[in-house]
């Protein structure tokens, strides 16, 4: 195999110029020639040329010193046996490649009032930092976003390094024909009271003021052609509806306490992966508190442990909790869950209902009335 | 007249070409061998005579069959008939 790189060496003798001219005649290209002491130079050559040069120099009575690698060859010669270093470099390179194959930032530009909704929708689609790039097909993501937000004229999704950039341009898009992605209806994504239906493409199948159920067709994917025939289109539109969202939390109003009876039993065990020895028997208490102490016999790395269990017999005492405290706790929990469900919604009203079921369960129901776009595209 | 006479001298092969870049670099193309090399003076044989480059810390960055590149602090470049 051809040896690459450069070696540096020293030559000494009378009339160095004569040797240099001779090397030149043999097409040996000397580099970085430096005059050292009297009758001495240092120069660089490729390892192959160095072999030829040595032959010429020795023939002419010159003394050539030992060649030392320079540049990349020097690093290789010095470190070629440091397996740990190469393994570390390989791991670092692999980690770098892995890191570059992920998305570390999602940047939404020019989204204006849609910013929150787009963020929420991207979360719903699983587009977030830390996801592999090949898991997100950009054209499909673009298409999904355009369908989800019909008031947006176009959306451009592209990668800039490890950043996913989504650029939004607002406007009313022209209706698209079926060939451009297939015909389909716009349906209601959830139950609600329709407040406004803006049809950009297709034929409206519902009207404002109407109660709609999830899955109901709001805009049909067809339009009348010039001759009165029905032409399939990609239905597009916006369906703003009043939607009620609830979250319900149940909480026990009773509190269970154990009261020790004074009866105790101690059980000791020695436990190893393939060996188990127990001294004493486990008591047949109906209710008990258990205090367990685990002590490694020799050390952390030796898997033999001494276990000491103290079974303390107890009676269960059921008491009634303070209802106001239970109510407050259940209400806070329900409200928290509701807030998590409403990421970017415009809240019109909200309220909380409490009820008690079978005298032992408090139910808190947090409800919010929001206005949201419930239009979803369904391909035929 | 030979058509080769119309070509510039460096193309005809008789004359060397000297390129001085700043005070740091002298490129001699078409040399005919090195006569002497010291850190303060380098003398090179060429088709039009002896080229002498004087300066400080002179090194030969490249010494090929046709080209010779001198680096360092160049103070003087002269050409003489002697040794040509």
Image (cartoon, rainbow, N blue to C red):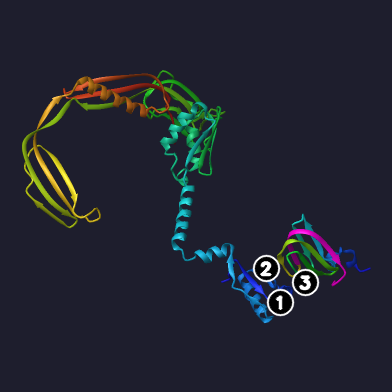
- Secondary element at image label 1: loop
**Disc 2 from disc 3: Cα separation:** 20 Å
The range drawn in magenta is B67-84
Is label 2 or label 3 in front? 2
Q: Which residue is label 3 attached to?
A: B33
Confirm whether the magenta stretch covers residue B75.
yes
Q: Please tell me if label 1 and label 3 are on a single chain.
A: no
State the residue position of label 1. Answer: A14
Q: Quadrant of the N terminus of chain A?
A: bottom right
**Residue nearest the viewer, comparing A56 with A214:** A56
Q: Residues within 10 Å of mark 2 (few under 14, many from 20)?
A: some
Q: CA distance from mark 1 to mark 3?
A: 17 Å
Q: Using a 10 Å C-alpha cutoff, classify the residue at mark 3 as few (fewer than 14 neighbours), some (14 to 19) or many (20 or more).
A: many
In terms of depth relative to the viewer, which is nearer, A51 or A187?
Answer: A51
- Position of residue A281 in the picture relative to residue B70 (left or right): left
The answer to whether one can see residue A7 in this image is yes
Percent position of residue A88, x then y = 45, 57
Q: Is residue A124 left or right of residue B7?
A: left
Residue B16 x %, y %: 82, 65
Q: Are marks 2 and 1 on the same chain?
A: yes
Residue A233 horizontal side relative to residue A49, left or right: left
Do the residues at pointers 2 and 3 share their chain?
A: no
Residues at discs 2 and 1 in contact (Cβ within 8 Å): no
Of the residues under marks 2 and 1, which one precedes in the sequence?
1
Please tell me whether mark 3 sits on a helix, a strand or a loop.
strand
Could you tell me how many numbered marks the image carries?
A: 3
Query: Quarter holding the C terminus of chain A?
Result: top left
Chain of the residue where label 1 is placed in the rendered structure: A
> What secondary structure is the magenta-colored segment mainly?
strand
Residue named by callout 2: A36
Say which chain tag 3 marks.
Answer: B
């Amino acid at each position: 195999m051809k040896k690459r790189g450069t070696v540096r060496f020293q030559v000494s003798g009378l009339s160095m110029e004569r040797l240099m001219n001779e090397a030149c005649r043999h097409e040996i290209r000397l580099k970085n020639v430096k005059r050292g002491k009297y009758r001495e130079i240092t120069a660089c050559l490729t390892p192959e040329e160095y072999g030829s040069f040595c032959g010429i120099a020795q023939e002419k009575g010159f003394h050539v010193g030992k060649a030392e690698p320079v540049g990349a060859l020097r690093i290789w010669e010095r470190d070629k046996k440091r397996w740990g270093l190469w393994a570390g470099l390989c791991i670092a390179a692999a980690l770098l490649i892995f890191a570059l194959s992920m998305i570390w930032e999602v940047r939404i530009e020019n989204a204006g009032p849609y910013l929150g909704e787009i963020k929420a929708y991207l979360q719903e689609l699983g587009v977030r930092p830390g996801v592999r790039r090949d898991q997100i097909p950009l054209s499909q993501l673009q298409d999904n976003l355009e369908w989800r937000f019909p008031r947006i004229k176009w959306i451009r999704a592209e990668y800039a390094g490890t950043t996913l950039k989504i650029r939004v341009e607002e406007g009313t898009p022209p209706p698209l024909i079926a060939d451009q992605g297939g015909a389909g209806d716009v349906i209601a994504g959830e139950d609600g009271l329709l407040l406004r239906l803006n049809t950009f493409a297709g034929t409206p199948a519902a009207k404002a003021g109407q109660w709609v159920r999830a899955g109901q067709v709001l805009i049909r994917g067809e339009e009348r052609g010039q001759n009165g025939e029905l032409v399939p289109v990609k239905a597009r539109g916006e369906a703003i509806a009043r939607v009620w969202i609830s979250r319900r939390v149940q909480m026990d109003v009773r509190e269970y306490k154990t009261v020790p009876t004074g009866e105790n039993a101690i059980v000791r065990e020695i436990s190893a992966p393939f060996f188990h020895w127990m001294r004493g028997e486990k008591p047949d208490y109906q209710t008990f508190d258990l205090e367990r102490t685990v002590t490694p016999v020799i050390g952390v790395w030796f898997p033999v442990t001494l276990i000491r269990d103290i079974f303390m017999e107890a009676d269960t005492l059921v008491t009634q909790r303070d209802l106001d405290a239970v109510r407050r706790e259940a209400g806070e929990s329900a409200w928290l869950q509701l807030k998590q469900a409403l990421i970017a919604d415009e809240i019109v009203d909200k309220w909380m209902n409490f009820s008690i079921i079978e005298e032992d369960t408090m139910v808190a129901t947090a409800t919010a009335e929001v206005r949201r776009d419930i239009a979803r595209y369904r391909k035929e | 007249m030979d058509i080769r006479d119309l070509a510039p001298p460096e193309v005809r092969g008789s004359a060397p070409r000297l390129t001085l870049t700043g005070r740091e670099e002298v490129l001699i193309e078409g040399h005919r061998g090195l006569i002497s090399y010291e850190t303060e003076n380098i003398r090179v044989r060429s088709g039009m005579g002896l080229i002498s480059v004087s300066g400080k810390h002179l090194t030969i960055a490249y010494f090929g069959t046709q080209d010779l590149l001198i680096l360092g602090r160049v103070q003087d470049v002269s050409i003489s008939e002697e040794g040509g």
